[in-house]
Amino acid sequence: MGSEVLLDGGVVTRCRRRVHLEHEPTVRAVPKAPPDPGVEQRIADAAEHRRALADKLGRLLGSDWTEIPRDASVHSRERATLAAMRAAAPYISGAQLPCDTTGGRRGAVDVLVRSADGYVPLLVVRHKVTDPGRGARTSPLTDPLPESARVDPLRKGRAQSRDQLRLAHSVRLLQACGMSASGRVVGGVIGADADVVLWHDLQAPSWSGGRSVLSEYDERFADRLAVAGAAASEAEPLARPSRISDCKGCPWWPVCAQELHATRDVSLVVRGEDAVLLRRAGVSTVDELAEVTPDVAEALPLAATRTSDAVLLAKAWLRDLSLVRRVPHLDVPRADVEIDVDMESYADSGAYLWGCWLSRTDTATDSGFDEAEGYRSFATWDPLPSDDEARSFAEFWSWFTAVRDRAHDRGLSFRAYCYNELAENRWMLASAERFAGKPGIPTVDEVREFIDSDEWVDLFATVRDQFLCPNGRGLKVIAPNAGFSWRDAEAGGENSMRWYRDAVGLDGAAPSESQRRRLLQYNEDDVRATLAIRRWMTTEAEHRVPYVGDL
């Protein structure tokens, strides 16, 4: 007997509640959140990347390359794919695999590769799939076969669970139609660098250890199929709403938010697995969590510090407080010469803009340090990836270190600040590595020495350690508490991706000067926001933000 629903491979990494809502007839007409422009842009970028790779592989592989028309109907593409497989075509691009009505599966795959007596799936993705190192099994694009894979002395594979689970889904579809290659079950991925095929052994232990990728996939898919089946038949739901990180960009969030607020669900202040554990322990609402006493807290399944924070967050949420001080007295490292830094990047292609705001104390001025206060930008408007990125980064680093050296020469203290150092650290180190030897580029050791020093301050960590934040700790959430607002009502990381495309003319139009100015203003406001938070924490916050001891 066939399944009532057919699911694609994406369901195994999708929220269970979202899978339910996508298949429940009674909520399909309920208004959903508008599409996220940033998500739409990433989807468009990925499609463009796949198209470019298909064209490149078609040129490399010549008559062995079979293209399934992407604009045809699903059924037509299924028939064409099955015909190509039966004809033993070496490579099939844009394949639409026959539906597995018994297993409840449907799906497409970027490329099917003929291997021995059947086919293996190959994905084309727009993210990095390897890192420098060794041990990955790769084959060249000119010979994209699993039989040609060798241990790569220059690369190690990234544990991209989503990629591996999508490959497992394609394998099960191939097995269902009798077209899967025999032997070891593998799948390939071509990443953003588009220089090799990375091959995954899907019968090896998964990224989480223990069982294989296929076993992990089978368990997840069976669960999602049961959730969707219950929803489609309007049976008792197998998935209830719970707030997780994915809710931010989910079109179904308005539906879930309404239900969560109506029930005052505990996940409104404690997300993810912690909320699940608390519900199992009998703490289901924010009100119940706020009433947890120390002796009850000892029996809860969370670590002591997490439990304490959760109780305080619940109390703050009930009082509609956006911030609560963890500590009696706030402490922000300050210096005579200070630089706030913010970097703008475009996906994994590179960092196109380094923005800085310099400020100084009267002590610095009196000592003869006369570097002008205010905003400075170091940008490249060549579409990334580009060697001009090396120039802009070198100019940023040269100016930055010159300011630091001048401060040291005058016996002045120096500090630089960012908000969540992961991105800035990543691109400083990556730029030093990628552009090593070019004029003005520091060594990786020089960069690492700086980011490991006390002169590099992650203000996000400072906020995290000294405040409880019921609504999150993002810059756009915290800065308004300091009285700061962005000049652009649409300011945000996702929108900046779209502005960047216009600024450099990625979509074929002439580069937009107005979008370049918009990006510079956005970047300037980001560094001014970190400055505003620091000054606010030093002067006002201690008197305006309630202390946890008073809750």
Image: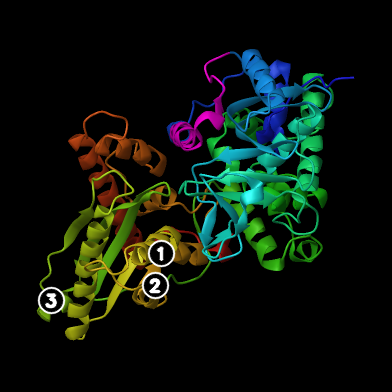
Question: Answer yes or no: do the residues labelled 3 and 1 have beta carbons within 8 Å?
Answer: no
Tell me if mark 2 has few (under 14), some (14-19) or many (20+) residues whose alpha carbon lies within 10 angstroms of its own.
some
Task: Kindly identify which residue carries mark 1.
Answer: 425
Q: Is residue 194 above or below residue 173?
A: below
- In space, the residues marked 1 and 2 are separated at their CA atoms by 7 Å
Toward which corner of the image does residue 445 lie, by quadrant?
bottom left
The answer to whether 68 appears left or right of 24 in the picture is left
> Is residue 169 part of the magenta span, yes or no?
no
Q: Give the mark nearest the N terminus, 3 or 2.
A: 3
Residue 151 on image: x %, y %: 61, 61
> Is residue 61 part of the magenta span, yes or no?
yes
Q: Main secondary structure of the magenta part?
A: helix
- In space, the residues marked 3 and 2 are separated at their CA atoms by 24 Å
The kind of residue tagged 1 is: Asn
Question: Answer yes or no: do the residues labelled 1 and 2 have beta carbons within 8 Å?
Answer: yes
Task: Kindly identify which residue carries mark 2.
Answer: 451
Q: Is residue 340 above or below residue 163?
A: below
Front-lying residue, 287 or 475: 475
* Quadrant of image for the N terminus: top right
Front-lying residue, 206 or 69: 69
Going by the picture, which residue comes out furthest to the right? 1
Residue 130 on image: x %, y %: 54, 56
Residue at horizontal 38 percent and vertical 70 percent from the top: 457
- Asked whether the viewer can see residue 19, the reply is yes
Going by the picture, which residue comes out furthest to the front? 63
- Asked whether the viewer can see residue 244, the reply is no
Which residue range is magenta in the image?
Answer: 46-72
